[in-house]
Amino acid sequence: MVVQNTVGKEAYGLYFAIINFTFLLQIISDFGIQSYNNKNIAQHRNLLGKYFPNILMLKAILAALYLLVIFPAAWLLQYEWSIFPMIFAIGINQILISLLFYMRSNVSGLGFYRTDSLLSAMEKLLMILVCGTLLYVPAFKENFRIEWFIYAQMGALLTATLTAYFIVRKHLPKIKWRYNPLYLRIILRESYPYALVVFLMTFYTKIDGVMIERMLPDGRSEAGIYASGYRLLDAVNMTGFLFASLLLPMFSRMLKLGEPIKPLFKLSFLLIWSISIAVAANVWFFRNEISSLLYVEATPYWGTVLGSLMLTYVAVSGIYISSTLITAEGQLKQMNGIFVVGIFINIILNFFLINRDGALGAAVATIITQSFVLLSQMMLIRTLFNFKLNKKLALSVLVYTLLVIMVSWKFYTFSGVIWEWRFIGSGGIAVLIAIGCGMIQPRQLKSLK
């Protein structure tokens, strides 16, 4: 946020578009290995010593291929040559992100869930400390450039990745590094379905930033405005991402052992729904106040984009839970079909709405697409696991949702207290409502440990 305020919406808009562009191709450097490895190590922990050196070698090959592909792709999108060094640096960061996720998948696959969460926090904390120094020390702040932000991320990612490597290394026998093309082909063949899931899911969530920047005459400015709202969506999405990282090995192991997964699915879904509804409702009503507080260039249009994007948090958080269960079950073909349809919906909507409404049009397209994907996945889960609709539970969810929206609106319209306290108070009441409606049951939360 402070980076965008320092470098301006256009410079940050370009960075945001390139981040999304390199994300679209990141599947080359990952190829579904993280999800494949997380699921298999959780079910067969004794295979870690065999998998680890071979997968690391494979990831090195894929990383080199990834770097070879992004430059022709950038040329096809007509990016200026002066931007290519930035594309290369961000590409290196994407490789480090993929490698860190792979290392963490081994940590969580071994059952060290708290360590996995700490590793996730470590990378972000290091980046905040380094970049914060550059932003708040006057000698650095005066000359701050967006490239410094990229290099701060690079250092934090590299440190966290090395830390994760040494944690995993402690639990491995002596590693034998050797090139085995047959084994690498087997890994690629088995991880391919997971790669397709990651690619399709990434495509319809990241293409909007690229389309905004490339389609509009003032694309970098509009992309910067979109990034200002998407940043907060990304931040709260960390909750869903951490849920997914922890639940995938849990679901995988429970399914292998034949244990009932419905209680864990219900608990995690209700918890994430409670959080997402409270956040989305609060941010929607206080959207202009939040934008003005965070961004020096903010206008009511910025607030509308922010509020619209945060409404998608409800669907996105649910998708994290539902897609994780479907992945653990191995039913990727059906889920990929849902994502393919989601891509077509998203591109068509973006094409028309971005031309008409700019960043706001992309936000509306995101709401529609993510809602479609969530509903489709829930229908698939009901079919796969024979989950029956619990009318009492559905009523509790509906009552909770309506009450939270009403409370958020009431706190917003109450003018006797500064808006920051009203915002916090609304969130606190939402927690009490969630407990009262049975959405959050403190005793059952221990089962997530």
Image (cartoon, helix red, strand yellow):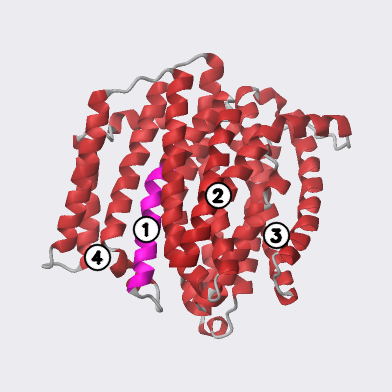
Q: Nearer the viewer, mark 4 or mark 1?
A: 1
**Dot 4 and dot 2 residues touching (CB under 8 Å):** no
User: How many neighbours does mark 3 have within 10 angstroms: few (below 14), some (14-19), or many (20 or more)?
Assistant: many
Q: Position of residue 266 (x, y in %)?
A: 37, 28
User: How many neighbours does mark 2 have within 10 angstroms: few (below 14), some (14-19), or many (20 or more)?
Assistant: many
Q: Nearer the viewer, mark 3 or mark 4?
A: 3
Residue 340 occupies quadrant: top right
Indicate which disc, 2 or 1, sits on the residue closer to the N terminus.
Answer: 2
**Dot 1 and dot 3 residues touching (CB under 8 Å):** no
Residue annotated with mark 3:
91
Instruction: Tell me the distance, in whole angstroms, between the alpha carbons under discs 4 and 1.
Output: 20 Å
Instruction: Tell me the distance, in whole angstroms, between the alpha carbons under discs 2 and 3.
Output: 20 Å
Amino acid type at mark 1: Ser
Residue annotated with mark 4:
420
Amino acid type at mark 3: Gly
Residue annotated with mark 2:
204
Name which residue lies at 45% across and 34% down.
Answer: 376
Q: Nearer the viewer, mark 1 or mark 3?
A: 1
